[in-house]
Image (spheres, coloured by chain):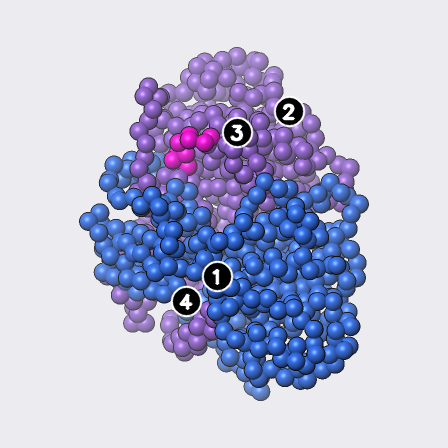
Chain colours: A purple, B blue
Amino acid sequence: MKYIAMFAAAALTAGTAWAQPPAACKPSSLNIPGAPYPCVMPDRTAMFRVNAPAAQKVQVSAGGRVDMTKKEDGLWYATTPPLVEGFHYYTINIDGASVSDPATRTYFGGGLWSSAIEVPAADAEFYAHKDVPHGVVREQEYFSTVTQQWRRAMVYTPPGYDANAKVRYPVLYLLHGWGENEVGWTYQGHVDQIMDNLIATNKAKPMVIVMDNLNAAKPGEDASIYNARSVLTQAVPVPPPAPGATPAPRGMPRMSNTFTEMMVADLIPMVEKNYRTAPGRENRAMAGLSMGGFQTLNTGLTNLDKFAYLAGFSGNCGSLGASFDPKTSCSGAFADPAAFNKKVKLLYISTGSVEGPRVKQFSDALQTAGVNNVYFESPGTAHEWLTWRRSFQDFAPRLFR
Amino acid sequence: MKYIAMFAAAALTAGTAWAQPPAACKPSSLNIPGAPYPCVMPDRTAMFRVNAPAAQKVQVSAGGRVDMTKKEDGLWYATTPPLVEGFHYYTINIDGASVSDPATRTYFGGGLWSSAIEVPAADAEFYAHKDVPHGVVREQEYFSTVTQQWRRAMVYTPPGYDANAKVRYPVLYLLHGWGENEVGWTYQGHVDQIMDNLIATNKAKPMVIVMDNLNAAKPGEDASIYNARSVLTQAVPVPPPAPGATPAPRGMPRMSNTFTEMMVADLIPMVEKNYRTAPGRENRAMAGLSMGGFQTLNTGLTNLDKFAYLAGFSGNCGSLGASFDPKTSCSGAFADPAAFNKKVKLLYISTGSVEGPRVKQFSDALQTAGVNNVYFESPGTAHEWLTWRRSFQDFAPRLFR
């Protein structure tokens, strides 16, 4: 029986005198139970350990690639330069094989289940699990008539949802980024803790948050943009673009309108049938990060009869940057600023201060053209989850006012 | 921005002519989106592929260790002997490093997030996701006064739970095995699909299923039995047993009564406060697999005022096997067979036909002693999830009658 072998082996290795990390090096909160590595020092350098007895070369890629060194105890060790605070995916490279670290829980990022490390942030309190009333996250399955498949959405219901059977709640539809999935916002983003904390301090209105998966393809439709990382690791041939198809904007996969079609035909009706939601566009918001921000604008700007609040975290309609033209870009949705400002209660745009100028350029161009938008910048962070946790924390209190 | 690098890399490798698997080799249902390997042939042999350019030796451990071979395309390939049908954890060994396969979703087993493969079973229909009404699985957080920590239980509510606001439901408390956690029964076990299918065909009564985590330790209490695999990979020192402590039965970690204390003081009251449960022992059942079966008997046999239905799948009170004495073993809970039979509506015991005689010996000894119990055997399976899926499917219809 498996656990017998496990315990026998455990007993055998238990006596070995493998080095323990310095007391000051705190195990990452994402480690599996009992794993002392990876750990983070007060100066935000991180220490990693890998058990690869016969390997010739071992590296860790966490904010840059660092060679690991084999020590007397036969294990490989490395200490990184100081890392940016927050959540980071990382990989171990063993003789050319890029794999996850068995010492951590895995998170779906870059199209696969990746190891990750959490570097405590100075402002970590806002996403910490506190002794406050907690909402519940539900795995909600539903059938899509558009994709002809069963899908799963994660649905956050706020504290008191079950007890207050008469109350109806506004709904935020919240999307992950490229290579992630419907659990990104709860597992990586701690959106449930952030929301619980905002509600407990009366900073945000209680709301239902629906987190679906960007991956929506009709039967026969090319879905390879959603699993590009498996292209890297598994060499799935990438079909050539269809004749005459518009090439994708730099760094951004071409998007189909299937997600929008699925959301309008299947997701929203399912949510409003199964959850006590308040009716109408003024009780509906949509937001997303990176590719999910792109999708939010794709979907939201063409369905302003359904949404009064829109947000793109580290995302705009197509990474256009300086080439963005308010008159024509984004399907001309901003061509009439006065009409747009009247219709949309909040257009929210955010980015990390060190992830490049594009999103700021997008916000500035809109402002110059007279399109109202709220711009937020996460200090010192790049295209990563602390940027999006902070964006959400700043964004959510502005909803449904 | 991360996805830019990803797509650039994807574009570079997209043209390479890496071999695709034979058409007859169906990708495992547990693969990440788009991954063609691992795949399963009609004869249940499985084909694996690993990208480890500079490795000297690569092996896959899936029902035995198989050497992989590097082919012209620079990737490592292996085909296993025919595998037993069902769900299997597996690992890739790269120059001595035991890691998960980046091509699959990861599952918490053996104390870490492991790759896994699903070999379609002849009777797979019973745990398949079908076009029937589906229940919802909720992540329910709660604070334990016993462990002084926040905990998470996964709670299955049956189809119609939210709509039928007047109905109260019986509750099954269902435990995972050693080295697994509270998501094992849904992720590996498909218990939600099995239950949805049983309810849709009126074979089982709608019930709430509460899946908690075996790991329950008070502040300062040794919890290393719950993370023994991290001992293997991370060399966490194992504390010596306390002076005079009873040595653990072979192959079974010593268990504390902390889980029982936590369940009675915290878990059951939380469930009955937050969910519409029917009152009394005749509406409560407890079951578990392997170490969770051991825990179920530990907890249930000493709390028969709270449970009328008990089950151990591949587990009994301490892997006693032939040395089991109905008069004295299991704290003497079976000393008075007549009283026990009168009190307990169902004692259910199951095992896989090829995982060893212990559980059958336990059931037989009870029967001989006059203790009623229902025994079930999963044909051809060992100490693995298909055994437990089948056990659940046979067990659930017997509850709350």
Of B379 and A105, the residue lying toward us: B379
Which amino acid type corresponds to the residue marked 2 in the rendered image? Arg
Q: Secondary structure at mark 1?
A: strand
**Chain letter behind tag 2:** A
Q: Which residue is mark 3?
A: A146
Same chain shared by disc 2 and disc 4: no
Residue B271 in percent (x, y) is at: 71, 56
Please state which amino acid type lies under the numbered disc 4: Gln
Dot 4 surroundings within 10 Å: few (below 14), some, or many (20 or more)?
A: many
For the magenta stretch, what is the residue range? A218-226
Query: Residue visible at 24% across and 40% down?
Result: B16
Residue mark closest to the camera, 1 vs 4: 1
Residue at mark 4 = B234
Tag 3 subunit: A
What chain is tagged by disc 1? B
Name the residue tied to disc 2: A281
* Picture quarter with the N terminus of chain B: top left
Image coords of residue A363 (percent x, y): 47, 25
Residue A360 visible in the picture: no
Q: Is residue B64 left or right of residue B303?
A: left
Q: Is residue B131 magenta?
A: no
- Distance, label 1 to label 2, CA atoms, is 45 Å
Left or right relative to A248: residue A184: right
Q: Is B292 rendered above or below residue A361? A: below
Which amino acid does the dot numbered 3 rest on?
Val
- Residue B97: x and y in percent read 33, 63
Mark 3: give few (<14), some (14-19) or many (20+) Cα within 10 Å. some
User: How far is mark 3 from mark 4, CA to CA?
Assistant: 47 Å
